[in-house]
Amino acid sequence: MHHKRTTCRACGGRDLELFLPLGDVALANSFLRSPDEFAAERRFPLDVYVCRTCSMVQLLDVIDPEALFRNYLYVTGTSDTIAAHNRGYAKAVVERTGASSRELVVEVASNDGSLLRCFQAHGVRTLGVEPATNIAAKATAAGVPTVNRFFDSRCAAELRAEHGPARAVIGNNVLAHVDEPVDLLRGFKTLLDERGLAIVEVPELAEFVERLEYDTVYHEHLAYFSVTSLMRVCEEAGLRVVRVERVPVHGGSVRVYSAPVERVRDHADDVKALAHAEQHSGIARPERLRQFARDVQAQRAELLGLLGDLRARGKSIGGYGAPAKGNTLLNYCGITTALLPWTVDKSPLKVGLFTPGTHIPVLPAEQLLARQPDYCLILAWNFADEIRRQQAEYERRGGRFILPLPRPRIL
């Protein structure tokens, strides 16, 4: 179920430095059904390394994807922010690739089909590839044809034979989830038609480092990409980057468009300029990442101090959200029910369960108003604006939200 790599997954090098040890942590999406399951819960090392050869930031501890993704609790369709993002995404891809009703768009790790439905609205043929059996079935039932399997280069050849080539192959927040990103991108390339583009969206390393987003580290997120390391994995897969766009979703992401090297000989000049600026800023240098780790330790001390002080003063505290990122933060900081007795979430898949590692009960979102705690820690901070809009009544009644990152602050 668990093995440890010894080589960089971008360049194959062995010069890897551990800079952020987050401890032995339960799997971020493995919520527990009852207290009977607490004792048998497994934990695995959550350690972040940088490759000193190519500057790729990554985990070396790899959990079997069958354990992580076959029955999955994250559904893209529950957030207003993501819905708006998807509509804009589909429009941009259709305009850039000229996809019409004749062409196929394939999405790898297509989840509940929310993004592909936006392509269907443009009249484009779609195909989803999704390993989570529960979520693939949900997508198919909603009218988005979905193949239930893990995607790799071999799968790509079979899909092309069966469904024909694709004008666009899209992977949102999946490149960082696979142990062999180069093989995944080779699969994207295999599927493309003569004008096709491979398009991936990943959280951006610069945002991760500058905004201290260490809670986006969990066992599913094996890689933390800079533009430089994205160019490297694309090169290894026979692709060249033609365009990079910054998008605000998930705490700051990049959307990368790439084309086969047979059609485009080199990365675009403005993409090379982005990589050059990144190297000049030193964002992936070991010494900068060591400073990041020191800042993470300081954030933990500050958050624990704030919550401990509020509890000592007799204040009540609840949480908002039960995202995977929240579980990294709760586990690393050692926040249990003593400091945070409960959290709420909008996802019916999580309500009634307990958070991995810290065993905090997840209640329905309506319970925030029903309980009206003095303070509410926003664990899903990337949706903070949306949460504050939806929970305006909580603040109107005197409740105060706390944002944990980059420094804990009361809103």
Image (cartoon, helix red, strand yellow):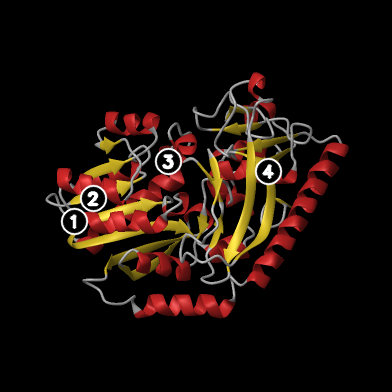
> Seen from this angle, which residue lies furthest left?
102
In primary-sequence order, the first of circles 2 and 3 is 3
Mark toward the viewer: 2 or 3: 2
- Residue at the spot 65% in from the left edge and 60% down from the top edge: 18
Write the residue at 65% across / 27% down.
Answer: 361
Q: Residue at x 74, y 62 (%)?
A: 294
Measured in 3D between alpha carbons, the distance from the residue under mark 4 to the one under mark 1, in whole angstroms, is 46 Å
Which x, y percent locates residue 330? 69, 42
Asked if labels 3 and 4 touch by Cβ distance under 8 angstroms, the answer is no
The residue wearing badge 2 is 105
Q: How crowded is mark 2: few (under 14 residues within 10 Å), some or many (20 or more)?
A: many
Mark 3 crowdedness (10 Å alpha carbons): few <14, some 14-19, many ≥20: some
Question: Element type at marker 4?
Answer: strand
Label drawn at residue 76: 3
Q: Label 1: which residue?
A: 99
Res 175 → quadrant = bottom left
Disc 2 element: strand
Reading the image, the residue beneath label 4 is 24
Residue occupying the point 54% across, 72% down: 53
Q: Which amino acid does label 4 sit on?
A: Asp
Q: Looking at the image, can residue 411 be seen?
A: no
Q: What residue type is labelled 2?
A: Val
Q: Quadrant of residue 388?
A: top right
In three-dimensional space, the C-alpha distance between marks 2 and 4, rounded to whole angstroms, equals 40 Å
Q: Is there CB contact under 8 Å for labels 2 and 1?
A: yes
CB-based contact (under 8 Å), mark 4 and mark 1: no
